[in-house]
Image (spheres, grey):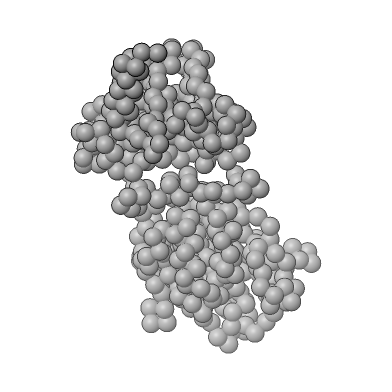
Amino acid sequence: MNHRFVSVLVGIRIALCFALGIAAVSQQARADRIGDAPEGWQSWSPRDEIAPRFSVAARAGRKGGTLLRIAGNGNPGVHGAWRKTMEKAVPGRYYHLVAYYRAERVANERRSVSARLDWLDEKGKRARPPDYASDTGKEGEWMRLEYVAQAPENARSVRIELSLAWERSGSVTWDDIRLVEVPPPRERIVRAMTIYHRPKGTKSAQESVDQFCRLVETAAAARPDVICLPEGISVIGTGKSYAEVSESIPGPTTSRLGELARKLNSYIAAGIYERDAAIVYNTAVLIGRRGEIVGKYRKTHLPYEEVEAGLTPGDSFPVFETDFGKVGLLICWDIQFPEAARALGLAGAELILVPIWGGSEVLARGRAIENHAFLITSSYDMKTFIVDPTGAVLAEASTRQPVGMAEINLDRKIIQPWLGDMKTRTWKERAVSASTSR
């Protein structure tokens, strides 16, 4: 082959990769047009030797559009994407990305299948770390991914990237991809309350529960959206056993908490002891604004003291829909182990309520950080606080100030320098074994 001709080809390839702002250590990335691909879409891989197979299917989409497909090509290190650059991104304005995909033989879709936005400056360089879209639900066989991003001040264009990685025999089909400018999104502000109180010398479960309710009522003017009470509010101070204060759900305590919830128009979480025939559980209940039982969680991690007292562990980690967002419940010893909070995070929990007797403040804050969730504890023997996804304490309750209040913004984006939006990146880059992936 003519050496001059080869030099020209290499020069064209290097120039193209430079224009896209992509580089690899040993070899330039490739970006190719595929015949019949929609205008502007190009295939890309960081290295030719791990490139997947790209293909298109005209008039085959959900709404009759063209499908973009990526297949694993038999290589366990496969990595590639469809890319399209949208010019004229306006700094400070908001853009809504929507994309649908259908995966086949992909073990961990959250890790291996991605839709993201790369904001580029006037030189075509990355303006900030990428924004990853999150899965927001299935429509038939299609998973919907979405993200609302504010263009950074130095952005001049934005690149959409739809990728597949590390699935030798898997494939992903992309459809109905949209990026449109939208008004600034409305933020979900939640007024959260936590209580520090330890009844002593009470004669019954009802008396202990009533003390908590009266304390909460003194702070009714704060108009809380959600209130967290401690673990075992029906046993603390009574001197009775778990079995002696156990009750059905619904039962007397959930009825009393329901009255309080209706009066304050608030959600309330609290720990009680649930009886189901001969079985007694350490249970946290979530009461809705109308006094209804939204759901319950049975403590899964039992210390030996509770095992020896005859309690039985639960076996699931439900997440509950509220009118402000998704809420998960944990109880005390659950904080000691990462799996419980991780299960709630994987299910989409944005706020974790933790009725707790006592435990590690560091671990509680760590669970908020590693799952990028707000977390509220209400306790007897440790800090009672409200924590944000960075681990920062927003409010605290104590003997001197038994009510802690904070406004939390569930839509707050925590953009870390050099890392980007940690809420979506946390889940996108989480490596798990096949036995623990979702």
Residue 289 seen: no
Q: Is residue 113 left or right of residue 297?
A: left
Label tally: 0
Residue toward you, 407 or 32: 32
Question: Horizontal and vertical percent for residue 122?
Answer: 20, 33
Q: Quadrant of the N terminus?
A: top left
Q: Quadrant of the C terminus?
A: top right
Q: Is residue 264 above or below residue 122?
A: below
Picture quarter containing residue 284? bottom right
Q: Residue at x 60, y 73 (%)?
A: 232
Kindly give the residue lying farthest to the right in the view shown: 278
Q: Residue at x 65, y 66 (%)?
A: 301
Q: Is residue 88 above or below residue 279?
A: above
Question: Horizontal and vertical percent for residue 403?
Answer: 40, 73
Q: Residue at x 49, y 67 (%)?
A: 364
Residue toward you, 48 or 108: 48
Picture quarter containing residue 192? bottom left
Question: Horizontal and vertical percent for residue 353?
Answer: 50, 62
Q: Residue at x 40, y 50 (%)?
A: 422
Question: Horizontal and vertical percent for residue 213?
Answer: 50, 72
Q: Is residue 216 above or below residue 342?
A: below
Residue 8 seen: yes
